Image (tube, helix red, strand yellow):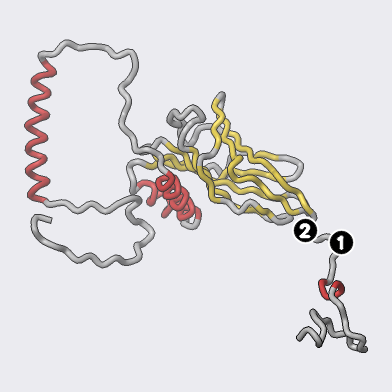
Amino acid sequence: MRGRTYPIEVAPAGALYAFRKVTFFDPAEEARQATEAAVAAQRETTKARNATVQRLASPPRRDFTPATDEMQLGLIRFMQMLSNLPEKQAESAVAANAALAWARRDTDPSVETDRFRIRPYFVVRNNAMSALGVAVSIENKTQRRLTFLPDSFILRSGDEVLPATAADFNPIVEPGEKNIAFFVIARKPDGQRVLLEPSTPMRLSIALVRDVNPNPAISVDVSDLLPRRNRSHEVPVLWSESQT
């Protein structure tokens, strides 16, 4: 920076840390840029006073950050951190980033089937990339082992049908257990941005692909399948002495 080198020691951060990046700035350069911006703003204001006002048919589109795989994974990791924080600290962590908004959804009604239950936990919106992150619990109501397809997670809200674009979820749920799942919806099926707010009413679903008995009634001892010597203790052998 300005011909100087600054050594940086990286250390673990506390509960409230930067979400995406650290920015280094030069106070003198910042002051110069602020002055130039003020002069430019004054020039634009003068120009606007003399311009003809026009009404647009639609609002101008704002630039936004593309929802890359890395960005979606970052949102999932952020949600995982939130799930392990007390509510006040979680609120502070979200408030520390102006691009984020969230809503607790654990009082929403659960989605019930005869074999499992889906209950929303919370929803985080990243306005910078127009993406929703959803944390849910998936509970196995049966005495069988259930296996789900993580990529099949779908959020429905009104006429919107939004499949997940990223997921982090242990798809095998043991009898009577529940797993916490984290999903990101970064775009609509047609590639358009997701405009839903975290508090928007929604319904969740996921595909069940396997339903098995975790304790099969029949088991086979591999030693019973091996040849044995003609001795009282019947020690299993894999080859004859002549072969050794």
Which of the pair 224/108 is nearer the observer? 224
What residue does disc 2 label?
214
Q: Is residue 123 visible?
A: no
| Residue 171 placement, left or right of 28 | right
**Residue at horizontal 23%, vertical 11%?**
54
| Residue 117 placement, left or right of 181 | right
Residue 121 position in % (x across, y down): 55, 46
Which of the pair 86/171 is nearer the observer? 171
Residue 234 position in % (x across, y down): 88, 85
What residue does disc 1 label?
217
The quadrant in which the N terminus is found is bottom left
Residue 203, image quadrant: top right
Asked if labels 2 and 1 touch by Cβ distance under 8 angstroms, the answer is no
**Residue at horizontal 54%, vertical 39%?**
164
* Label 1: few (<14), some (14–19) or many (≥20) C-alpha neighbours in 10 Å: few
Dot 2: element: loop
**Residue at horizontal 73%, vertical 40%?**
113
Kind of residue at badge 1: Ala
